[in-house]
């Protein structure tokens, strides 16, 4: 499928975005382990999360889906049954890594297979610590890549300091730790998104977060069944927030979006670049903060993105690179080598596509240097099979002369079903929408020290 985009007229819109991908994966897994029926609302029915749903079904969990965004998960008190065949994780790294953690402690063997894209991604980051816990995991692909054959068995808790900042690694170890003897501690040198620990404690599993940034889970506990409402995904909102921020006087309001501060670093960057950003947390009752974000656009200026900020906006870097190309001056993204092992080599993909649109960009080993503003021109652009590359360059097309064509854009379904409908609202707004102003302005903070 090709996505065709033209320059956007004045942006003045109010939208909402689909459920958070990271939270959707975790909610369905923990609900499945709980001691009863859990209703999950606001679930993201994208391909990635549906792979997790189908994997849990293959492990004997009944999951009903009365409508696209509602799941009724029948928890079986941690009892899983051996899958009849291999489990397909599609292109979802989160599915494969979290499941590896879960399956490492089960008394049966399973095999996790992947699409070509995921089959290239490294699994040593989970195999090493899970093996230390006593698991027997063999990566059948070259250089520790999928498929994974997991011979589950008794595990012992460990203390582990991951060499890469990864919430998937932390999540896998916490799930393994739930089935391990004793306690399991993950010590992160740079904090990553904390949805797994929040979700576990919401389901009344005892965990402890320490001031040094480490998190501990105590083994042998059964999550208590609860209903849960998943907020909108700030990483999906990011595409539209950048579009509004980069258009002088562009205006956008997004309701009901997750505002967990391990995920909102994008908002601080847009402020630094000169946009007006307001956020208001509206629901503090639920475990994950959610609320409204409002952005008003301005001529953007370049910035530096590095250090502790990187894990807090890792998925937003493709669209922030587009913002950099539209901003005046130099934008530098560094210490972001992880981008090379996402759904594509995102550093190479961003550099390729920005250059094809006429931007000045230099590729570095662990990031990018972008000199803007360049007048962008429409081009035929590959998606590299990467949903976030496809969406970032569809948004770049809103700022380009002529037509931009994003090729092989069907991958967008992995995280954002309905993206094209919102894109259509940006290019052909049906009506002027008057939005309610919100409270709680943010003030810019200096860039991270390297
Ligand atoms: C995710 C963690 C991040 C992120 C991915 C989702 C998660 O990956 O890029 O889209 O849900 O845990 P890493 O854990 O590899 O950094």
Image (cartoon, rainbow, N blue to C red):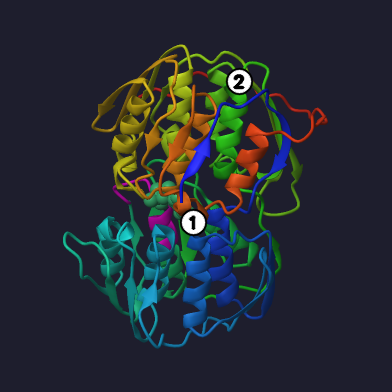
Q: Position of residue 75 (x, y in %)?
A: 61, 80
Q: Is residue 170 magenta?
A: yes
Query: Helix, strand or loop at disc 2?
Result: loop
What's the CA distance linking mark 2 and mark 1? 28 Å
Q: Residue furthest front?
A: 402
Q: Is residue 392 above or below residue 225?
A: above
In magenta segment, residue 148: no
As helix, strand or loop, the secondary structure at mark 1 comes to helix
- Residue 340, horizontal then vertical, whole percent: 29, 42
Of mark 2 and mark 1, the one earlier in the sequence is 2
> Which region shows up in magenta?
162-172
Please report the residue visible at 29 percent of the width from the left and 62 percent of the height from the top. Answer: 129
Q: Crowdedness of circle 2 by 10 Å Cα count: few (<14), some, many (20+)?
A: many
Q: Quadrant of the C terminus?
A: top left
Between 75 and 331, which is closer to the camera in this rendering? 331
Residue drawn at 37 percent across, 45 percent down: 165
The residue under label 1 is 414
Instruction: Indicate whether 58 appears above or below 331.
Output: below
Residue ID at (71%, 40%) = 15
Residue at 74% x, 27% y is: 440
Given residues 224 and 55, the one toward you in this image is 55
Residue 371 falls in which quadrant of the image?
top left
Q: Is residue 447 visible?
A: no
Question: Do the residues bearing badges 2 and 1 touch, measured as CB atoms within 8 Å?
Answer: no
Name the image quarter holding residue 332: top left
Q: Which residue is mark 2?
A: 247
**Residue 14, image x, y percentages:** 74, 36
């Amino acid at each position: 499928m090709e996505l065709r985009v033209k320059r956007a007229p004045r942006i003045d819109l109010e939208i909402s975005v689909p459920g958070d991908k990271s939270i959707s994966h975790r909610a369905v897994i923990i609900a499945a382990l709980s001691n009863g029926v859990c209703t999950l609302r606001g679930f993201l029915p994208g391909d990635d999360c549906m792979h997790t749903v189908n994997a849990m079904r293959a492990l004997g969990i009944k999951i009903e889906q009365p409508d696209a965004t509602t799941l009724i998960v029948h928890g079986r008190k941690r009892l899983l049954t051996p899958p009849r065949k291999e489990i397909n994780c599609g292109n979802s790294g989160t599915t494969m890594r979290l499941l590896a953690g879960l399956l490492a402690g089960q008394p049966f063997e399973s095999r996790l297979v992947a699409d070509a894209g995921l089959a290239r991604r490294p699994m040593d980051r989970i195999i090493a610590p899970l093996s230390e816990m006593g698991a027997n995991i063999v990566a059948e692909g070259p250089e520790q890549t999928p498929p994974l054959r997991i011979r589950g068995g008794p595990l012992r808790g460990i203390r582990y300091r991951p060499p890469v900042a990864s919430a998937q690694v932390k999540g896998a170890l916490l799930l393994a730790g739930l089935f391990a003897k004793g306690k399991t501690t993950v010590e992160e040198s740079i904090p990553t998104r904390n949805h797994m620990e929040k979700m576990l404690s919401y389901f009344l599993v005892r965990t402890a977060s320490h001031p040094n940034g480490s998190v501990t889970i105590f083994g042998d506990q059964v999550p208590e069944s609860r209903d849960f409402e998943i907020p909108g995904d700030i990483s999906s909102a990011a595409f539209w927030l950048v579009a509004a921020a980069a258009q002088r006087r562009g205006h956008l309001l997004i309701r009901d979006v997750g505002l967990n501060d391990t995920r909102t670093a994008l908002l601080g960057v847009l402020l630094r670049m000169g946009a007006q950003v307001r956020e208001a947390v509206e629901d503090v009752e639920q475990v994950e903060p959610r609320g409204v974000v409002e952005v008003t656009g301005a001529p953007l200026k370049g910035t530096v993105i590095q250090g502790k900020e990187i894990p807090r906006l890792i998925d937003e870097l493709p669209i922030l690179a587009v913002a950099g190309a539209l901003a005046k001056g130099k934008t530098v993204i560094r210490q972001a080598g992880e981008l090379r092992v996402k759904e594509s080599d995102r550093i190479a993909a961003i550099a390729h596509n920005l250059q094809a649109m006429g931007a000045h960009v230099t590729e570095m080993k662990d990031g990018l240097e972008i000199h803007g503003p360049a007048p962008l021109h429409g081009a035929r652009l590959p998606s590299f099979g990467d949903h976030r590359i496809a969406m970032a360059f569809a948004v770049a097309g809103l700022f380009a002369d002529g037509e931009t064509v994003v090729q092989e854009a069907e991958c967008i379904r992995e995280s954002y079903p309905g993206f094209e409908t919102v894109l259509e609202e940006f290019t052909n707004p049906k009506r002027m929408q008057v939005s309610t102003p919100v409270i709680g302005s943010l003030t810019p903070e200096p860039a991270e020290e390297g």
